[in-house]
Image: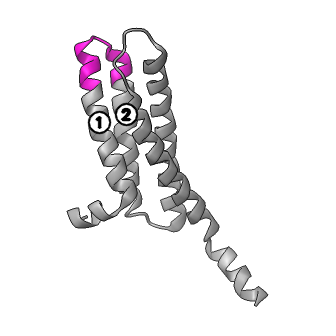
């Protein structure tokens, strides 16, 4: 995928920016010897964009939706790890990460609701009603 296409795709751009923030945050966690959460958050936080990117070359609409659902699941897991960081003692501030993840979740939710609504079968049914 060309960089111009990547930059013009909101979910790819948002999830990539989030992943960069996660990498930076996890490096802080590693310095503070908070290895377990750092590794878990790094995996889930970077996986969101990887799955969204993979969805761009889906074999079918169902495959696209499936890959975006996986991205959404990884976002939920990332939220869990960020909540642990937020409510645990002696963890670095993660408010910006949570705000960026909320943006990612909104876009993923919109993509999934739009994709599910526009199934070929529902289009066929609406055509028959006219």
Q: Disc 1 marks which residue?
A: 21
Using the rendered view, name the quadrant where residue 95 is placed. top left
Circle 1 sits in a helix, a strand or a loop, which is it? helix
Callout 1 environment at 10 Å: few (<14), some (14 to 19), or many (20+)?
A: some
Q: Is residue 60 left or right of residue 97?
A: right
Can you tell which mark lies on residue 128?
Answer: none
Query: What predominant SS class does the magenta segment belong to?
Result: helix
Name the quadrant of the N terminus: bottom left
Q: Nearer the viewer, residue 92 or 49?
A: 92
Dot 2 crowding, Cα within 10 Å, few <14, some 14–19, many 20+: few
Q: Is residue 95 magenta?
A: no
Give the x, y percent position of residue 118. 60, 71
Foreground: disc 1 or disc 2? 2
The answer to whether marks 1 and 2 mark residues whose Cβ atoms lie closer than 8 Å is yes
Horizontal side of 129 relative to 81 (left or right) equals right
- In the rendered image of this protein, does residue 78 appear above or below residue 123? above
Residue extent of the magenta highlight = 26-38
Compared with 120, 50 (above or below) is above
- Could you tell me residue 18's position as x and y percent? 34, 41
Scheme of colours in the image: one colour
Q: In this view, does 113 lie to the left or right of 43?
A: right
Q: Is residue 30 magenta?
A: yes
- Residue 127 position within the rendered picture, expressed as x and y whole percent measured from the top left: 70, 87
| Front residue of this view, candidates 56 and 59 | 56
Pointer 1 or 2: first along the chain: 1
In which image quadrant can residue 24 be found? top left
Relative side of 70 to 31, left or right: right
Could you give the CA–CA distance between mark 1 and mark 2, rounded to whole angstroms? 9 Å
Look at 45% across and 12% down and name the residue there.
88
Q: Is mark 2 on a helix, strand or loop?
A: helix
Residue occupied by mark 2: 96
For the image, the number of numbered tags is 2
């Amino acid at each position: 995928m060309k960089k111009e296409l990547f930059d013009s795709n909101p979910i790819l751009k948002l999830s990539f920016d989030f992943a960069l923030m996660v990498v930076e945050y996890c490096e802080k966690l590693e310095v503070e010897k908070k290895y377990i959460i750092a590794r878990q958050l790094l995996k889930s936080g970077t996986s969101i964009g990887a799955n969204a990117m993979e969805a761009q070359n889906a074999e079918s609409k169902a495959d696209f939706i499936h890959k975006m659902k996986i991205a959404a699941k990884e976002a939920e897991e990332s939220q869990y790890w960020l909540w642990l960081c937020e409510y645990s003692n002696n963890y670095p501030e993660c408010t910006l990460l949570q705000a960026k993840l909320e943006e990612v979740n909104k876009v993923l939710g919109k993509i999934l609701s739009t994709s599910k609504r526009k199934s070929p079968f529902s289009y066929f049914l609406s055509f028959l009603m006219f």
